[in-house]
Amino acid sequence: MEEHLHLGAIALLLVGAAVGGLLLAGLRQPPLVGYILAGAVLGPSGFALITDRPTINSFAELGVLVLLFVVGMHLSLRAFKSIWRTALGATLFQILVSLSLLLAIGGMLDWPLGRSVLLGFVLALSSTAVGIKMLEDIGELRNATGRCVVGVLIAQDLAVVPMLIIVVALGAGAALDVPALLLKLGLAMLALAGLIWALSRRQRIHLPFRRLLIRYPDLAPVAGLTLCLIGAAATASLELSAGLGAFLAGLYVGNTTERPLMVQALEPIHSLLLMMFFLSIGLLIDFAFLGENLYVVLLMVALVFLVNSMINVAALRLVGEPWRVAFIAAFALAQIGEFSFVLSAAGASSGLITGEASRLVVAVIAISMLASPLWLELARRLHAFRAAPPEGVILLLTRLYRDEARLLRLRSGRMVQGGSQLASTIGGGIERVLHRGEAPGEPEGQSTPSPEGPDELERSQ
């Protein structure tokens, strides 16, 4: 008998994603974090509402294609022209350092060249969707920091073109044909440069079916998705990633005069498509694998954040960005992004990494996306922090998260009134740490200013 999709399970999955997004939004975190968690909890490794791997992979691939199309559509090459030197310089520095680091690690671990290059590329790419959403949530998207981050993200997205060509060539199985690879890279870069030049000219560019869109605006979503799939099919036929074609199609649409119409038409389904992508990431998380390799995954995530933050700070300072812009932007770019999924999938299909290594890459990328808002919030508090206590890390963290500690103290105090001995012990410990963590000359009860203002968290409760 022919198998059909279990619509009830899919409906529950979407409801779970909506609930997860609302819960995380209530906690002042991006809803996309809730989508990933919902996919992980309700997927094959959790409650197993959907266990068919081919269905999950198709779901994930469709989500990637549509997301990359929407990302490309929102990128303005005309705006990129004002910051292209800074963005390209920082991106090239970041890629070179990431590649050098992974080549050194691969040499020590006897990795094949292709695997080291692939993981270096994966490390060098940040998430456009996550980075822009986080900056928008904290009000930094429209200022100098936001322009810097968006410029670097555009440069990284464009750098995926040569990255994919190199990954496919290294995974071809036969001996590496260097002249053919260089020729293909040269042609691809010329084509990309020509596309950028054509789309960034002052002369207006129109979609070929502009009159039909103006007359029948209801066709705009269908036309957008059709262009997305045409671009994906075109690059797939050239033995490149389908996601690359979807991104280039979105880039083309986003730099035409019909961009406002297309953006407005796709806006109602934009949130749904974004949820589909991040939900698919959660569906791919393997809890059994994660439990067996938890320390390795957490160590790699920590290294990703630390290494990427340091590389990005150095890169942005090197190209002349002010310290504050470089610091906040570097932390916003620390996570691994959507194109890293595309690269890892290309590497897995080319044999550069095994199935187990692919699961490890998926776990690290997903957890880095989950932890990105917390990492950026830590960066904002560290930057606003002026006088760190010399006594140790615990007191530094206490002063950074003073408002949260006070809220916990208040709640433990209410539990003490109810007769909880454990709450009394916790409250006493928090009281002692808070007392020790007071800055010299800082009055009792006054916290270090945070970006949201002192005691904002307590007032919101």
Image (cartoon, helix red, strand yellow):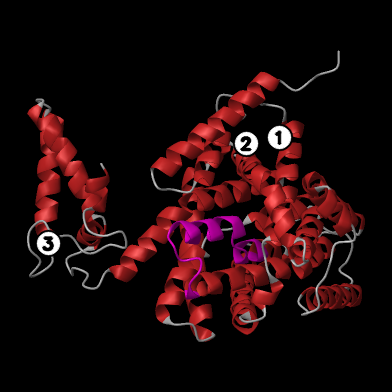
Nearest the viewer among 433 and 213 is: 213
Question: Could you tell me if residue 282 is visible in this image?
Answer: yes
Identity, as a three-letter code, of the amino acid under mark 1: Ile
Q: Is residue 109 above or below residue 51?
A: below
Instruction: Say which element carries label 2.
Output: helix
Q: Is residue 367 above or below residue 149?
A: above
- Part of the protein shown in magenta: 120-144
Identity, as a three-letter code, of the amino acid under mark 3: Glu
Report the residue at 52% width, 85% height from top. 318
The quarter holding residue 76 reads bottom right
The residue carrying mark 1 is 56
Q: Are marks 3 and 2 in contact (CB under 8 Å)?
A: no
Does the magenta stretch mainly form a helix, a strand or a loop?
Answer: helix
Report the residue at 40% width, 76% height from top. 324
Q: Are marks 1 and 2 in contact (CB under 8 Å)?
A: yes
Nearest the viewer among 280 and 82 is: 82
The residue carrying mark 3 is 438
Marker count (numbered)? 3
The quarter holding residue 385 reads bottom left
Q: Position of residue 281 (x, y in %)?
A: 62, 43
Q: Position of residue 433 (x, y in %)?
A: 13, 53
In this rendering, would 108 be left or right of 61?
left
Question: Could you tell me if residue 41 is visible in this image?
Answer: no
Q: In the picture, which quadrant includes the C terminus?
A: top left
Q: Is residue 200 above or below residue 295?
A: below
Mark positioned earlier in the residue sequence (1 or 3) = 1
Mark positioned earlier in the residue sequence (3 or 2) = 2
The residue carrying mark 2 is 283
